[in-house]
Amino acid sequence: MTSRLATAGVPGTREELSQLSLIRDYYLRFRVLIYEIGKFGVVGLVATVITFAVQNALYGHAGPTTSVVVANAIATCFAYLGNRYWAFRHRKTAKMGRETVLFVFFNLVGTVIQTAFVDFNRTQDSDGVLGPYTVAGPNWQKFIRKDTTQALVGLEVESPDPAGLAAHWAKIIEAPVGKNAAGEPTLSFVNNSFRFIKGPKEVLGGLVVKVNDVAKVREAAKARGLKVDGDSFHLCGVNFRLVA
């Protein structure tokens, strides 16, 4: 009989029954704790989603520090209510005030650390076109010359799959893919555009530069021995296309 039960997958020895009993005892002993840990994890996950969602919603409408503080404050309130009245609601305590203070304190410390990293990683007014640019050195704006070159207005990116690469970057920067008159995929921005063209590999193929006098720049390129093709010249493997 024992052999038939064991063959059918039913424990038939005292050792097997003892092991199952031990597992059951452990489960019954820690059942509440297991449920609490699961609920605590759910609350923490939702609080994290809230933090990122609020930060993204405030992006462009408030400063980075303000976004972090507001997002963490909302997430902290949610986490406290979720843990106190759901995950650990059955736990009665006479020290609720002390627990609340500690909970808020530790979340405040976490917020301070996060905002410190955000401020450390960002330069004031660096989002502007003429904002601080460490690589260019201090007061780099004073050395801008527009007697010849006005602006960089476009980039030409080569790829074996121009449409696929354009779609890839469009998804990242959340911008629609357009097409120019030649049917080539493009990404348009406020002050420039990206054009994706066929090439043997993914590489920056060209720059479109707005200049005051196309003929003057073209002749200067010829005088320096650069390869000139129409209103474009080649320098260091990159094609510079001139527009007025």
Image: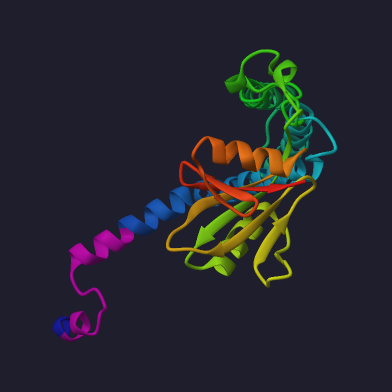
Q: Quadrant of the N terminus?
A: bottom left
Instruction: Tell whether position 68 is magenta.
Output: no
**244 or 195, which lies in front?**
244
Q: Is residue 131 visible in this depiction of the protein? A: yes
**203 or 165, which lies in front?**
203
**61 or 174, which lies in front?**
174
Relative to 24, residue 235 above or below: above
Relative to 20, residue 10 above or below: below
Q: Quadrant of residue 23?
A: bottom left
Instruction: Tell whether position 17 is magenta.
Output: yes
The spot of residue 76 in percent (x, y) is 72, 35
Q: Residue at the spot x=26%, y=66% of the render?
A: 17
Dominant SS in magenta: helix
The spot of residue 103 in percent (x, y) is 67, 27
Q: Residue at the spot x=66%, y=38% of the render?
A: 217
Which residue is most to the top? 138
Q: Is residue 91 visible in this depiction of the protein? A: no
**16 or 157, which lies in front?**
157
The spot of residue 213 in percent (x, y) is 75, 40
Give the number of marks: 0
The spot of residue 214 in percent (x, y) is 72, 44
Relative to 172, residue 16 above or below: below
Q: Residue at the spot x=45%, y=54% of the render?
A: 28
Type of colouring? rainbow
Q: Which residues are magenta?
A: 4-21
